[in-house]
Image (cartoon, helix red, strand yellow):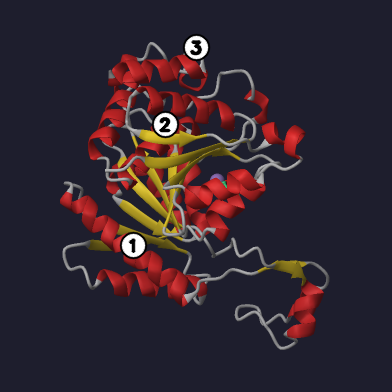
Amino acid sequence: MSKKKVVALGGDGVGPEVVDATCYILENANFGLEVLKPPCGEAAMEQYHNAFPEEARQLCDTADAVLFGATGTTSGAILAYLRWIGDNYIGVRPIKYYPGAGSCLKDPSGIDFVILRENSEGMYSFIEGELSMLREKLPDLRSTRSGRSISDFGEGKFALRIASQHGTQRLAKYACEYTMWRKKNHYPGKLTCVTKSNVLPETDGLFQKIIEEETKKYPELSYEHYYADDTARRLLRYPTGFDVIVTENLFGDVLADEASELVGGLGLAASAGLGGKVAYFEPVHGSAPKYAGKNVANPTATILSAKLMLDYFEMREEADALERAVAAAYKDGKSLTYDQGGSATTTEFAQAVLREIK
Ligand code: IPM
Ligand code: MN
């Protein structure tokens, strides 16, 4: 097998520190990856006056995968390129408890599910504007509930929420196949569709219908639907009752942050962006500028994102070794970062994980 080429882009804030810590593990564990680190983000501003220099962009185009840190205000263009321009429409956000991690629950044992987030449309259409513009173009548009027309709202703004047939269909297919794959690996094989189809009968009505229809092609898979508000509650009350959740972009964003607290918070929440030109892997957390440059951020979320990348490369042994090492570091508990009640630095945690691999 030829070496997989990984482009590591730290981005902003704590991004470069958690990505460096992860690359340190990937390189020293001898996983046989080629890891490239072109300048980008805040660090590139001085020299290139550009957070995403051409060199970095071109490398991304030729990479097998990109490992990304975080975006604050500076590196927005990197995420836009990886997620929206690259059309990585599948957001994979696993929520799994590793004993030793600081859950908000008394008993988090057995929590192990995945949120699949539609990553390209929904409330993230980035089509917003003045109500006056909408009024001019669509004078007859009325609320089906109150009967108010756009003019009745007066001045203000609107945002467009999109559930396209194609966009939902492709996610539905992935969600079913992914749940089946989990089932083959001894998970329950249950897909939970989360919407607000009660108040959004058009967009979420379509989303729910397409997911539901697709599941019928997979008789071995079980299916359920919950509303998003109900799901927010169920995540806290019945967290072991989920296997795979599939939902619209904004709901996925919010529920994934909420669910991360069940298993230790954003310091551990990993993600993958798949389905597009070049897959990318990033922690769910942001750039945390308050902690930047202090070597204190928890790199686990990025390390577990790299584990998802190894899964994606079908490097099963390496992926398992990395995950086992993270689990062992949490179980041991001597090298945890401040967010987990420890006092280890970012680097020290990475060193502890590497020791567990070797
Ligand atoms: C995430 C982030 C992004 C999102 C931001 C940075 C656009 O919060 O990946 O969850 O809202 O999707
Ligand atoms: Mn988010």
For residue 105, which quarter of the picture? top left
Q: Earlier in the sequence, mark 1 or mark 3?
A: 1
Query: Given contact means CB atoms under 8 Å apart, are the residues at marks 1 and 3 in contact?
Result: no
Q: Earlier in the sequence, mark 3 or mark 2?
A: 2
Identify whether 51 is placed above or below 228. Answer: above
Q: Position of residue 2 (x, y in %)?
A: 31, 43
Dot 3 lies on which element?
A: loop
Q: Nearer the viewer, residue 144 or 40?
A: 40
**Visible residue check, residue 221:** yes
Q: Determine crowd level at label 3: few under 14, some 14-19, many 20+ residues with C-alpha closer than 10 A.
A: some
Discs 1/3, front: 1
Residue at label 2? 303
The dot on residue 343 is 3
Q: Earlier in the sequence, mark 1 or mark 2?
A: 1
Residue 51 relative to residue 237: left or right:
right
Q: Position of residue 260 (x, y in %)?
A: 44, 38
Q: Position of residue 86 (x, y in %)?
A: 52, 58
Which residue is at a point 35% across and 21% down the rendered structure image? 330
Inter-mark Cα distance, 1 to 3: 40 Å
Residue type at mark 1 is Tyr
Q: Determine crowd level at label 2: few under 14, some 14-19, many 20+ residues with C-alpha closer than 10 A.
A: many
Residue type at mark 2 is Ile
Residue type at mark 3 is Ser
